[in-house]
Amino acid sequence: MDFAFFLIQLLNGLQYGLLLFLVASGLTLVFGIMGIINLAHGSFYMVGAYLAWSLSSMTDSLVAAILLAVPLTVILGMALERLLFRHLYQRDHLYQVLLTYGLILVFEELRSIIWGDDVHGVAVPALLNASIPLTDNLSYPVYRLAISGVCMLLAAGLYFLIQKTRLGMMIRAGASNRDMVQSLGIDIKLIYTLVFALGVALAAFAGMINAPLSSVTPNMGSQVLIICFVVVVIGGIGSVKGAMAASLMIGLAETFGQVLVPEVAGMIVYVLMAIVLVWRPEGLFGKA
Amino acid sequence: MQKKSTYDRRGFLLGSTAIAGATAAGALLPAGTALAQQGKLKVGLMLPYTGTYAQLGVAITNGFKLAIEERGGKLGGREIEYFTVDDESNPAKAPENVNKLVQRDKVDVVIGTVHSGVVMGMAKVLKESGTLWINPNGGAGAMTGAACAPNFFRTSFSNWQTTHALGKVLKAKGHKNAVFITWKYAAGEEMMEGFKEGFEKEGGKLTKELYVPFPQVEFQALLTEIASIKPDAVVAFFAGGGAAKFLKDYQAAGLKGKIPLYGSGFLTDGVLDAVGDAGEGVETTLHYADGLDTKKDKAFRLAYAKAFKLQPDVYAVQGYDAGQLLAAGLDGVKGNVANKVGVIKAMEAAKIDSPRGTWTLSKAHNPVQDMYLRKVVGKENKVQGVAWKALADPARGCKA
């Protein structure tokens, strides 16, 4: 591998890492901060992708589709929290696992009824449908770079929301002691509803802007679910910063792993996770 | 004529319930009046009816039933009774599911399935029970290789077959070296082997084997690797959503048009609507293609479209041929399925007049068939010619 290709692989790794962060960010919020084990995270990702596909084929514009779909997913998130998740905060994690596993089945079946079992593609917006030549036979799609930009903005926004705003302070306080926050006169129920809805919307948004890159297919959610949990666990539960660091680490490890040691590429991420957990059981940025 | 070819599922179901009722009544009659020869033939369909492969399961079922309907709903003079199990493409449940058909329903023949892992699970049970088995899809080499058995038949392909002919194709185009990219799992590795063998025989060199962990679809790193290797050609196998994404990424990375892309036919089957123009010009080999324009294919497509309001695909053809093969077997023994040796003999000798072209069975009971070279033109896999006439799987390790 000469130096130019090394740089391109570095870019690939970082770009893939940012994409992972985008997909995992909703989970960081819901699992990391609210403490809910949400196996249905991948389903929300899938719902987002299918919404982007069906709405963009109706409106002929991915941007319009996203603007329409995001409010829908916020409403979906709020409804799910009100009707289902609210009753499980005080219970054992096992109940959450059961509920969210059930939701996976429900969403897969609904997807099959509403949208069918076909593979679909979403067109890249015309404005971003270009490539930048890197070498004589390789070029880089502008849309991928644009997504990287969106990911960085989102990461910064999330970090700011949780660490620097009053709402973020309440969310963090609620995560560590719910009863205390409530007795201080803060409507913790409302805050939880909002955070959960934000988590759902983030997962769905990831599915939407990722739709032109990854085709829209049945079971697409289950493929991203595991890697999302790996990101959150390596990064440290409850840390946006950690999730970002973990995403980039995994992105680079996978990229170079596939090229340098293809025989074991499938294991690299998990080996990395094992090493991190032995070294820091609470994750990179987690609080013990 | 018009009336006969109309086929609708409700009518079929009604018909079969009526028949089921009639036999139930028949069972109450004194044993002496029952005619063993006229009992219904029990056909067990073990296919995916839910999950990712649900559509494939439906296409195969439709094709199979069309073949039976064309014979007046009877094989060897016997009515058919269907038993259905949804295998969910779950290899872990394969033995349990196939036992439902073999032990509970006591079927005469098992038809299934799509997923290769489930196929290998079925093989274990069916080898022991000796039940007649026709596999209308799953291409696992071992089924007609190391694990072959006299009662095992396949009407589709072996993974090896789908890429072997590409060696000749690449040589003819003047490509001296190539890179193969696929998922790291059994089917991918078998297709890679099939290609490698065929290409090296022609003096070509497989420069590198690139593997993506299954079922991941992040190809960027390996596409960069391909750009740095600069092979004469790239050969790929992915399927479904993975195939759609690979075709799009290949184009977006600027490789399309610079390094020609080839593949196993599954790379471009059923995904062309999803990929825009990213598939255009990609050449693949498979045992079926669009635009074959034979009398049989035209008639089949018309009848299928009429009956199911759907366009048939390669899976429907494989299901249809499973029906045809079973028909040949039962005609050979005049419906006396108890004469298993006779059925097997008749099936082995059958010449199947398939929409894909005529084919026969190899010693290991896998189709010996023409592999077509196809090229993506618009939304079709247009036939370009025959890449390999009567290609037979080597059936390595088959001793039965």
Image: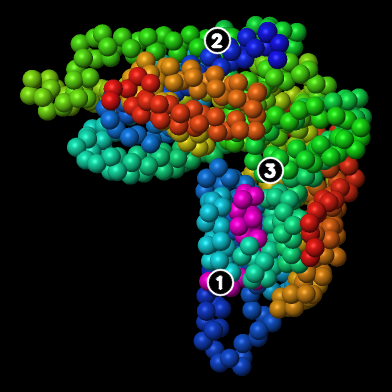
The residue pinned by badge 2 equals A145
Whole-percent x and y of residue A267?
Answer: 55, 33
Q: Nearer the viewer, residue B182 or A267?
A: A267
Expressed as whole percent of the image width and height from the top left, the position of residue B157 reads: 76, 49
Which comes before the other along the chain, label 3 or label 1? 1
> Is A93 situated above or below B118?
above
Circle 3 chain: B
| Quadrant hosting residue B366 | bottom right
Residue at 80%, 63% (x, y): give it: B399
The crowding category of the residue bearing disc 1, from other C-alpha atoms within 10 Å (few below 14, some 14 to 19, many at least 20), is: few
Q: Is residue B89 above or below residue A63?
A: below
Residue at 47% across, 24% down = A207
Circle 3 packing at 10 Å, graded few (<14), some (14-19), many (20+), is: many
Q: Chain of mark 2?
A: A
Query: Residue sitting at 73 percent across and 15 percent down?
Result: B228
Colour scheme employed for the rendering of this structure: rainbow
Label 2 neighbour load within 10 Å: few <14, some 14-19, many 20+: some
Q: Label 2 sits on what residue type?
A: Leu
Check residue B187 in the rendering and tell me which mark sits there, or answer none. 3
Residue designated by label 1:
B103
Can residue A126 be seen here? no
Could you say whether the residue bearing mark 1 is in a helix, strand or loop?
Answer: helix
Q: Amino acid at mark 1?
A: Gln
Q: Amino acid at mark 3?
A: Ala
Q: Quadrant of residue B380?
A: top right
- In this picture, which residue range is highlighted in magenta? B104-123
Cβ atoms at labels 1 and 2 below 8 Å apart: no
